[in-house]
Amino acid sequence: LPILYTDPHSGIYVRPYRDEADLQQIVPLIATDLSEPYSIYTYRYFIYNWPKLCLLAFSDEECVGTIVCKLEPYSQDTIRGYIAMLAVKEGYRRQGIGSRLVQLAVRLMLDDKCDEVTLETEITNKSALALYERLGFCRDKRLLRYYLNGVDAFRLKLWLTPKKWVAS
């Protein structure tokens, strides 16, 4: 599978999901980061249905970041992308890897005629909120006690295509 991006300074490169060996690297990376434990079936649901929307960032042979997404019709005239998981390994944060993964995933969704992209993040996760807002996502909705730990979430949305506004 093609390499989608290589950072000229760090040499970190991004490629799409290949096989089960990738899954073995993705699971611990995400499990370390996220407050919600996912079952292996959740990973497989996303990765097997939308393999090209699962991207991995590597430093040499080590997976240091990943994004897992899906893309589905949402309504009669809207195709919605969804970012389910984003994680960057501790020692590799604040180098633009997370932003690059989001940008590459959104570009792939746009290639498939995506109209909007959504995700949820804990309202206490200031760095995630800042990252997504820098990339143009807006706070769309507050979801009360969304997570198992009782924390509220924000649903964030990125609009990619202008919609036809109908006067009522």
Image (cartoon, grey):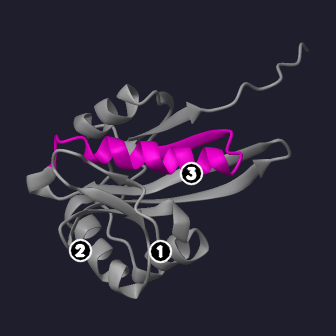
Residue 16, above or below 129: below
The type of residue carrying mark 2 is Pro
Which residue appears at 56% of the width and 51% of the height? 108
CA distance for labels 1 and 3 = 21 Å
- Please, what secondary structure does the residue beneath circle 3 have? helix
Name the amino acid, label 1. Thr
State the mark number for residue 108.
Answer: 3
Q: How many marks?
A: 3
Residue bearing the label numbered 1: 42
Return the residue at label 2.
28
Foreground label between 1 and 3: 3
Residue 158: x and y, percent?
Answer: 54, 33
Residue 22 placement: quadrant: bottom left
Q: Position of residue 29 (x, y in %)?
A: 24, 68
Q: What is the secondary structure assignment of the residue under circle 2? A: helix
Where does residue 154 sit, x and y in percent of width and height? 43, 37
Name which residue lies at 41% across and 30% down: 135
Mark with earlier residue (2, 3): 2
State the extent of the magenta-drawn residues as a range: 93-119
Q: Is residue 35 above or below residue 96?
A: below
Residue 118 visible? yes
Residue at the farthest left position: 91
- 76 left or right, relative to 158: right
The quarter of the rendered structure image containing the C terminus is top right
Q: CA distance from mark 2 to mark 3?
A: 25 Å
